[in-house]
Structures are given as structure tokens and as C-alpha cells.
Image (cartoon, rainbow, N blue to C red):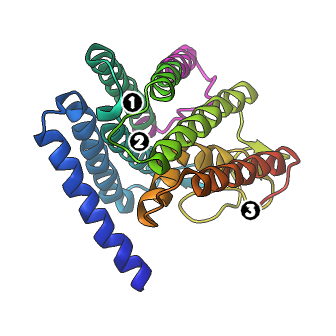
């Protein structure tokens, strides 16, 4: 309980820092900040719809997936809003923010609209509309990932002087691992399924619905993508000053997520 209270206080301090960043003219990040808040609002809206929806897809309520995507997009947007002030190039950041907001909003629109229609948003090959929509989702998110790679390159090449070495390396590794496992999402897309050893659907843990019987590639995808939050959070919460502990933690984390991926490829549940 004490640790959770500590995390809560640190989170409040982080939100204060976020508002101060914007107050100090980091205006390029403002659209991402609002994008994050809006998607968290969407998650709450979909959560409110949940009890009134009785339709299911692959054994779970239609609105579970939109809730997960809205939360993930919200956290992702807020994370980039914090990182962008430390990236050089105002025009570059403006273009990145604009494209990222469009790509994420399009992704959310597709997932939510397909849920409302009672259709799968991913791997759906039943009809021209569903095929084209899924292809466009893949194109948009791939382009956003490639753009993120260039932003990461800029952060590596021009490390900010107003960040400690611990946080710089946490963000660097967070970017690399996140991008790597974003590309793993492309591998899942090529397979047209996230379950290994059985068809998608079936028994899974509550809400996340990760398979409890077969390999599930979404687990590594989730932990890999959120390295962008977890590694900087590790540096920040534990007030680490030196880069070596962060690098060791990042390598261990990458090994852990890679093992989850390998384990799923064998068709084994967690």
C-alpha cells in the first residue's frame, strides 16, 4: 500500500511537470496531450456502454477491444507529449505530432466502428470493406512506426542537455524496444491471427483475454510496446541517477519480452 501511495504521489508530480512543460511554450506537444486525454475519455465511454452490450466476438464483449485500444492510445499519446520537448527540430515535431494524432485517431475510429457493427477490426477478410479497412489500418500504423524510428534516431544523435543520463538511456531503450515490438505486430498481421496452436478466441484471462491454453503473441506485443513507459518510469520512480542500472534493466526487460514472444511461438500459454 505504501508503494502504491508513493506511485500515486509521483504520478501527481509528473502531471504537474507535464502542465509546466506546456506552460513553458512546448506547444508542439499540446495536440498529443489532448489526444491522450480524449482517448482516455473514450475508454470511459466504452466502459459505460459495456453493461448494455450483449453481443460478443470471439467469446468476449464487443467493447472490450475498443476500451483496451483507447487506453493504450491514451497512454502512448501522453508519453510522446512528455518526450517531444526534448527532441530537436520544431517543424519535424509539428509534422510528427500531426501525423501521429491522425494515425491514432484513424486506428481508434476503425476499432470502435467495427465493434459497433459487430465485426472484427483485425484479420477480417469477410468482404471488400473489411479487407480495405484492415489494410488501411496496417498502412497508417506502419507509417507512424517508421516516423517514430526517425524521431528515435534524432534523440540518439542529439541527447538533451537538460535530462539526466539515466532518463536519456531509459527513453532510448524504451523507444528501441517499443519500435521493435511494434514491428512484431506486423508479423502478427501477416499470420492473420494472434493465437499459436489454435484459432483466435477461447479461454483467456479477464479483460485482456490473453489465451490461457495456447501461445498468444499479443502478450509480448503489449509488454514490448509499453517499454516506452515502463523504462522511463523505472528511472523516474526509483530516482536513478546513473545510466548503468537502467541499461541492465532494459536488457533484462528486452530478454523477458523476447522470451514471451518465443514462448508464444511454441504454442505455449503463459
Residue position marked by numbered label 2 in the rendering: 76
Magenta-highlighted residues = 115-144
Q: Rate crowding at label 1 as few (under 14), some (14 to 19) or many (20 or more) other CA atoms within 10 Å.
A: many
* First along the sequence among labels 3 and 1: 1
Is 258 part of what is drawn in magenta?
no
> Which residue appears at 30% of the width and 55% of the height?
44
- Marking on residue 265: none
Give the residue number, with chain letter if any, for mark 3.
212
- Observer-nearest residue: 228 or 88? 88
- Disc 2 or 3, which lies upstream in sequence? 2
Left or right, 169 with respect to 92, comes to: right
Q: Is residue 61 visible?
A: no
Q: CA distance from mark 1 to mark 2?
A: 10 Å
Please say if the residues under marks 1 and 2 sit with CB atoms less than 8 Å apart: yes
Q: Is residue 27 left or right of residue 69?
A: left
Label 2 SS: helix
Distance from disc 2 to disc 3, alpha carbons, whole Å, reads 27 Å
Image location (x, y in percent) of residue 91: 27, 14
Q: From this viewpoint, is residue 18 visible?
A: yes
Residue 27 picture quarter: top left
Say above or below: 84 vs 210: above
Amino acid at each position: 500500500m505504501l508503494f502504491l501511495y508513493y506511485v500515486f504521489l509521483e504520478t501527481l508530480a509528473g502531471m504537474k511537470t507535464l502542465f509546466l512543460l506546456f506552460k513553458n511554450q512546448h506547444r508542439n506537444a499540446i495536440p498529443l496531450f489532448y489526444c491522450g486525454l480524449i482517448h482516455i475519455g473514450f475508454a470511459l465511454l466504452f466502459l459505460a456502454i459495456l453493461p448494455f452490450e450483449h453481443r460478443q466476438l470471439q467469446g468476449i464483449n464487443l467493447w472490450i477491444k475498443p476500451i483496451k485500444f483507447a487506453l493504450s492510445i491514451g497512454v502512448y499519446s501522453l508519453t510522446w507529449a512528455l518526450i517531444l520537448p526534448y527532441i530537436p527540430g520544431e517543424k519535424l515535431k509539428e509534422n510528427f505530432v500531426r501525423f501521429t494524432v491522425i494515425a491514432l485517431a484513424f486506428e481508434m475510429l476503425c476499432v470502435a466502428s467495427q465493434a459497433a457493427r459487430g465485426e472484427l477490426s483485425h484479420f477480417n477478410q469477410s468482404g471488400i470493406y473489411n479487407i480495405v479497412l484492415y489494410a488501411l489500418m496496417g498502412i497508417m500504423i506502419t507509417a507512424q512506426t517508421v516516423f517514430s524510428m526517425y524521431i528515435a534516431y534524432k534523440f540518439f544523435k542529439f541527447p538533451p542537455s537538460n535530462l539526466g543520463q539515466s532518463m536519456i538511456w531509459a527513453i532510448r531503450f524504451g523507444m528501441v524496444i517499443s519500435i521493435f515490438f511494434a514491428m512484431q505486430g506486423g508479423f502478427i498481421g501477416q499470420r492473420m491471427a494472434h493465437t499459436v496452436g489454435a484459432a483466435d478466441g477461447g479461454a483467456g484471462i479477464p479483460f485482456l483475454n490473453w489465451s490461457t491454453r495456447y501461445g498468444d503473441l499479443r502478450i509480448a506485443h503489449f509488454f514490448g510496446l509499453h517499454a516506452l513507459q515502463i523504462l522511463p518510469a523505472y528511472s523516474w520512480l526509483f530516482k536513478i541517477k546513473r545510466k548503468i542500472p537502467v541499461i541492465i534493466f532494459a536488457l533484462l526487460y528486452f530478454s523477458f519480452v523476447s522470451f514471451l514472444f518465443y514462448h508464444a511461438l511454441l504454442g505455449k500459454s503463459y
